[in-house]
Amino acid sequence: MKNHLIISLLFLSVVVGQQQYNVLSVDVGQQEYNIKNLLKRDGVFVKKFSDDSLNGMVFQMFGDIKVPIGMIKNGKKNGKWSHWYKNGRKKDEGTYKDGKLHGLVISWYKNGRKKGKGTYKDGEPDGLVTSWYNNGGKKSEYTFKDGKLIPNID
């Protein structure tokens, strides 16, 4: 009986762990922008045919479904951003601060296997950065400090 409970809990954790959610805090009345109607100039998002500074939620359409992908503040990425493959699987996820990667960044292959994972600080890799092959085998692992590669001393 104990083994059945452990196996059931293990199965449940694997199934629940496979669910992917993209939760953004969206304020009522907040501006929303379709990513296909935006341009990026000098690292700043602007609407086509406009130079106005943008603030609000950016989304992408998949058929009739509006999928939030991130927030912009003064035209720059801010907070959590996620991109998706057309098959519905997550392509990448990262946190931005004032338009620069800042925090954990993870990317996946179309088959759902992890492609890369690393931590960034002010747009530069900072800490362990790991990449994997499409079959799941580890490809590389490097350590960075303030964007500079730290030599691996064995």
Image: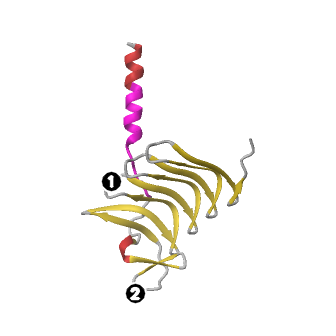
The residue closer to the viewer here, 147 or 48, is 147
Q: Residue at x 47, y 73 (%)?
A: 55
Image-based side of 67 in relation to 103, left or right? left
The amino acid on which the numbered mark 1 sits, given as a three-letter code, is Gly
Judging by the rendered image, the residue that carries numbered circle 1 is: 88
The mark closer to the camera, 2 or 1, is: 1
Left or right: residue 79 compared with residue 110: right
Residue ID at (42%, 51%) = 109
Amino acid on which the number 2 mark rests in the picture: Phe
Q: What is the crowding at mark 2: few (fewer than 14 residues within 10 Å), some, or many (at least 20)? A: few
Image coords of residue 5 (percent x, y): 39, 19
Q: Quadrant of residue 97?
A: bottom right
The image quarter in which residue 105 lies = bottom right
What predominant SS class does the magenta segment belong to? Answer: helix
Q: Secondary structure at mark 2?
A: loop
Whichever of callouts 2 and 1 sits on the residue coming sooner in the sequence is 2
Q: Which residues are magenta?
A: 9-24
**Residue at image mark 2:** 49
**Residue beneath the point at 37% across and 76% down:** 37
